[in-house]
């Protein structure tokens, strides 16, 4: 694994180290009496969100790449549209799970180039693990304690498994009627057993990278920083994240930060992908 040092750039390693430091800061505040306030959209924000955001912005500044961060006012698109590269950062993804103390939260950092997520990392502060990668780089998982010991990093590759049923990831806290319709559609169309796996935050992509989940449909509101890292990493093992309306990959650094409805496909499911009739049900539109 010694060639890992030549796979990733210096600023990618800076992002990894930054996520480890942010995770340590978050854990210091976890299960403590932290201040909780509401943002303008009525979603909660904690001291841990803000402290992690401040740390990440400070450390990523040395890369001289602009930053889009959930807890910072987004710069006007008239300026952002000229950025060829930008970091997309969720300093604490899964704030509701952090407050509920169910361990399902993460730190997400993605590198966007020309509106595409080319590199991503998702750090699990509780388990002290990280997955990193992208289509050009492959995907690796390591314990925080092995960050400097590249020989202990595990490369994750596209699997060759024979599955008896499909496992579908759904949100721990956010659901919609379209999600219910999709699950019924899927079960009827494929006449197969399905298992649902609830989890908060981008940790769903950990399950996809471990080949434990094959589909992640999302028909509720998400923002760019929620998904960018997961998309980059999933593409690194041959998966896809596609808009339900256009069947195109999600784009980033858009005029508005909202994601459209999407489905994340594990490579094990892609053989069935063409059998989707995207216009058969209104939840695909």
Image (tube, rainbow, N blue to C red):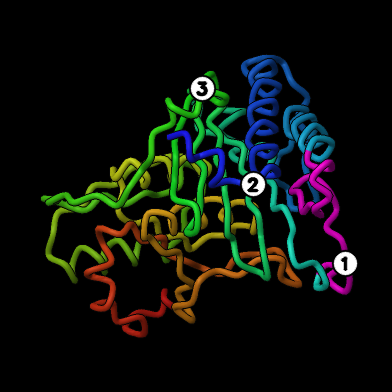
Segment colored magenta: 60-80
Whether 215 is drawn above or below 30: the answer is below
- Indicate the position of residue 194 as horizontal and vertical percent values: 20, 52
The label number, if any, that marks residue 76 in the structure image: 1
Q: Is residue 171 left or right of residue 56?
A: left
Label 3: few (<14), some or many (≥20) within 10 Å?
few
**Numbered tag placed on residue 9 in the rendering:** 2
Q: Is residue 13 left or right of residue 232?
A: right
Q: Is residue 142 above or below residue 236?
A: above
> Could you tell which of marks 2 and 3 lies nearer the N-terminus?
2
**In terms of sequence position, does the residue under pointer 3 or pointer 1 come before the other?**
1
Distance, label 2 to label 1, CA atoms, is: 28 Å
Residue 68 on the magenta span:
yes
Q: Which mark is residue 146?
A: 3
Of circles 2 and 1, which is in front? Answer: 2
Q: Nearer the viewer, residue 92 or 179?
A: 92
| Residue 131 painted magenta | no
Which of pointers 2 and 1 lies earlier in the amino acid sequence? 2
């Amino acid at each position: 694994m010694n060639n890992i040092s030549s796979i990733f750039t210096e600023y990618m390693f800076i992002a990894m180290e930054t996520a480890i430091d942010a995770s340590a800061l978050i854990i210091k505040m976890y299960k403590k009496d932290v201040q909780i306030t509401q943002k303008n959209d009525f979603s909660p924000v904690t001291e841990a969100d803000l402290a992690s955001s401040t740390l990440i912005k400070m450390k990523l500044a040395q890369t001289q790449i602009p930053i889009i961060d959930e807890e910072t006012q987004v710069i006007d698109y008239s300026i952002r549209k000229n950025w060829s590269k930008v970091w997309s950062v969720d300093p604490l993804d899964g704030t509701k799970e952090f407050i509920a103390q169910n361990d399902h939260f993460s730190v997400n950092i993605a590198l966007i180039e020309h509106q595409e997520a080319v590199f991503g990392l998702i750090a699990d502060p509780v388990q002290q693990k990280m997955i990193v990668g992208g289509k050009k780089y492959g995907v690796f998982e390591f314990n925080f304690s092995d960050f400097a010991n590249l020989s202990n990093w595990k490369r994750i590759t596209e699997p060759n498994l024979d599955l008896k049923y499909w496992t579908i990831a759904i949100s721990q806290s956010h659901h919609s009627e379209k999600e219910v319709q999709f699950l019924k559609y899927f079960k009827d169309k494929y006449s197969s057993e399905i298992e649902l796996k609830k989890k908060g935050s981008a940790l769903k992509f950990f399950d996809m990278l471990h080949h434990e989940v094959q589909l992640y449909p999302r028909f509720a509101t998400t923002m760019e920083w929620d998904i960018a890292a997961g998309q980059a990493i999933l593409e690194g093992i041959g998966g896809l994240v596609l808009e339900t309306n256009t069947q195109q990959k999600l784009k980033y650094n858009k005029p508005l930060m909202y994601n459209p409805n999407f489905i994340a496909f594990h490579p094990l499911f892609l053989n069935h992908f063409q059998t989707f009739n995207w216009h058969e049900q209104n939840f695909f539109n």
